[in-house]
């Protein structure tokens, strides 16, 4: 039976900015702003059923619920279902599952409980104010998101753009494929979105929502998360310069012809 989805309260960006990890590194254009977006910092759960104090610490992120980091090739585990049957959880993502080529050793995981969970971090982009407030900051959000077999658990990455007083200025998101879109196979697939950073943005709240639907554990997967801000290129002056030069050359040629005819 599916459990009612309860998103963590931090889905409301302005309600949790004081609770989240905040990046202390100045944001730089053209570089990934997400800290530990590939889940490689720290340890990973090698089984897949860690809960409570057994969940590995996740550097750079503030988790809720049983949000965790799972090792690729985790062994899985056995449990007894309500009918008294022993069932084994196996076939978790490994080196041969769909996913990024440079997948490293670990990925983010909804966790070992039958419940929704999340993780968040706050990125300071105040030093990019001149670009953003000029309406010239574009963002690119991407990540490998996925799930397990026929389970309907979903992985959602939200970015909330916050102003000087933590007011919400806009948002963007990417979502994992459904089980049907994955052909009911276990794996992660690249998702991406692009847009303009709202004028006045000073912080960006990155929120990973692992939306539980069914199964013994929360099989929402995330890996290689990226958020990059790039300035809009200035219009090239080369075409105008070429036109101006052509007009000047044409004028000189006509003048020379006129002088010779006198």
Image (tube, rainbow, N blue to C red):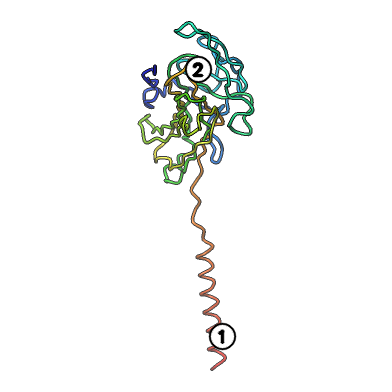
Labels 2 and 1: the sequence-earlier one: 2
- Residue 101, image x, y percentages: 63, 34
Q: Residues within 10 Å of mark 2 (few under 14, many from 20)?
A: many
Residue at point 53% right, 36% down? 190
**Pick the front one: 14 or 118:** 118
Residue 80, image x and y in percent? 50, 7
Where 220 falls versus 76 (above or below)?
below
What residue occupies the far top of the structure in this picture? 84
* Image spot of residue 216 (x, y percent): 48, 15
Q: Residue at x 54, y 62 (%)?
A: 238
Check disc 2 and report its element: helix, strand or loop. strand
**Considering depth in this image, is 246 or 77 the residue closer to the camera?**
77
Q: The C terminus appears in which quarter of the rendering?
A: bottom right
Can residue 8 be seen?
Answer: yes
Q: Which mark is residue 155?
A: none
Whole-Å distance between the Cαs marked 2 and 1?
81 Å
The image quarter in which residue 89 lies: top right
Near-viewer residue (88 or 10): 88
Label ID, residue 256:
1
What is the x, y in percent for residue 256? Answer: 56, 85
Residue 111, which numbered label? 2
**Element on which disc 1 rests:** helix
Can the viewer see residue 62 in this picture?
no
Q: How many tags in the picture?
A: 2
């Amino acid at each position: 039976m599916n459990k009612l989805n309860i998103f963590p309260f931090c889905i409301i960006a302005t309600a949790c900015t004081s609770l989240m990890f905040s990046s202390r590194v100045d944001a730089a254009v053209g570089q990934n702003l997400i800290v530990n977006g590939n889940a490689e910092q720290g340890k990973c759960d090698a089984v897949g059923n860690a809960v409570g104090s057994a969940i590995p610490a996740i550097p750079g992120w503030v988790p809720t619920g049983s949000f965790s980091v799972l090792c690729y090739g985790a062994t899985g585990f056995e449990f007894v279902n309500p009918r008294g049957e022993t069932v084994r959880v196996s076939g978790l993502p490994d080196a041969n599952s769909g996913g990024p080529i440079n997948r490293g050793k670990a990925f983010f995981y909804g966790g070992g409980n039958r419940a929704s969970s999340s993780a968040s971090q706050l990125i300071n982009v105040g030093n990019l104010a001149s670009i953003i407030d000029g309406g010239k900051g574009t963002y690119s959000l991407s990540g490998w998101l996925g799930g397990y077999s026929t389970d309907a658990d979903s992985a959602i990455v939200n970015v909330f753009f916050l102003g000087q007083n933590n007011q919400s200025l806009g948002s963007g998101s990417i979502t994992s494929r459904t089980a049907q879109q994955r052909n009911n196979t276990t794996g992660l697939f690249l998702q991406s979105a692009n847009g303009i950073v709202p004028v006045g943005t000073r912080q960006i709240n990155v929120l990973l929502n692992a939306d539980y639907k069914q199964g013994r554990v929360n099989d929402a997967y995330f890996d290689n998360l990226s958020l990059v801000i790039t300035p809009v290129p200035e219009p090239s002056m080369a075409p105008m310069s070429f036109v101006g030069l052509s007009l000047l050359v044409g004028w000189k040629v006509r003048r020379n012809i006129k002088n010779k005819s006198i």
